[in-house]
Amino acid sequence: MTTEIANKTLSERIEPYVAIIGPMVMILAILLFMAVAEPARYFRATNLNLILLDAALYMPMAMAMTFVITQRGIDLSIGSIAALSGIMMAFLIKQYGFSVYVAVPIAILLGAVMGLINGLIITRFNVPDLIGTLAMDLVYRGFALVLAKGLVLARFPEFLTEIGRGQIPGFIPIPVIIGMATMIAGYVLLTRSYFGRYTIAIGSNPEAAELTGISVNRHKVYAYVLMGACAALGGVMLTGKLNAIQATSAPYFNLHVIAAVVVGGTSLFGGRASMLGSFAGVLLLSMMINALVTLRIEFFWQSVASGVVIVSSVALYTWMQKKDRDGAGGVFAGLMTPDGQKMLRFSAALIGVLIALLAIGGLFAGNPNPSG
């Protein structure tokens, strides 16, 4: 075994880590650019703390979404699950006098039940994941709107705000600890458990997995239950972070989480997963959005930048998976082909657009002139 490892070329050793190399290179590019454009504002401790807090909110959901997407699934209802779970928790605390220590587990359990419903709709009624979760997104959001009746529920016990934005003195914020713990648990589950192995097998070839004795539908339901519970945890963390919750909260959770997972190298076509990549993807998107805010670029341009990163990543990983199927001698060998050169130029052009956008923001990063 040791001899086989020693005989591997550098490219063969690096290839398993390509998924995480992509987002890490983008993270390094953002750090280098901001070190030139806005070092004082971007690298101050309070701003780095904001980046970590923002990333921590999405870590539990990115962990669960990695399993869902690896099984060739998708969940577009997580924002509504987060909002409805947060609303239910808020009502239990504010209106019915429940202890926060009881209301939080109930909210997470409710999220798991909603995930179970999603899974059963997809597996029992053969509704495509995209349509099923999109429909349930409308259902859960509708319930949240009916329950909240336009109210903003706010001012919760300290324990809840500690979950969302608290910090252990002299240590990292509590939400970051929660987020990192879920990512570590997800890594262990993906790489060291039968559930992780079955997830990859189902995503690679559902029919073959079924023939080997794996209960494909049951494991799909498990993934959606985990997704629902983690979405509810995200709703709890969001409520604590804002110290408030309303029915329209978390409208873009699904897009942000799916983007982070895909950018991190998990294939939308199933069978390829990287928990480390998902973590890097979450961190990358939080750093990028924070950089755009630091440069005072409008929210609409932030959406453009996010879209550029997503398109570039999906195109690259789709090409990589095709090379795997075609047996092109691996990713690095494939990059030397004409198709590989086209992909490199395409990715470079998209990343260039992102850098140009950051540069434009840097030019106008000075204090805005007062109007009138």
Image: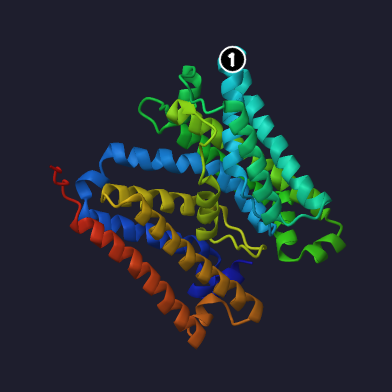
Decide if residue 239 is in sight here.
Answer: yes
- Relative horizontal placement of residue 334, taking residue 135 as reference (left or right): left
Image color mode: rainbow
Which residue ends up furthest to the front in the rendered image?
Answer: 372
Decide if residue 184 is in sight here.
Answer: no
Tag count in the figure?
A: 1
Report the residue at 75% width, 51% height from top: 220
Which residue ends up furthest to the bottom in the rendered image?
Answer: 338
Report the residue at 66% width, 35% height from top: 111
Q: Nearer the viewer, residue 169 or 291?
A: 291
Q: Nearer the viewer, residue 35 or 296?
A: 296
Secondary element at tag 1? loop
Residue 245 x %, y %: 50, 29
Residue 85 x %, y %: 61, 31
Residue 127 x %, y %: 76, 54
Dot 1 alpha-carbon crowd within 10 angstroms: few under 14, some 14 to 19, many 20 or more: few
Q: Is residue 140 above or below residue 164?
A: below
Quadrant holding the N terminus: bottom right
Q: Is residue 359 above or below residue 149?
A: below
Q: Amino acid at mark 1?
A: Gln
Which residue ends up furthest to the top in the rendered image?
Answer: 97
Q: Nearer the viewer, residue 105 or 74?
A: 74
Residue 20 x %, y %: 49, 60
Residue under label 1? 95
Quadrant holding the C terminus: top left
Q: Is residue 174 above or below residue 322?
A: above
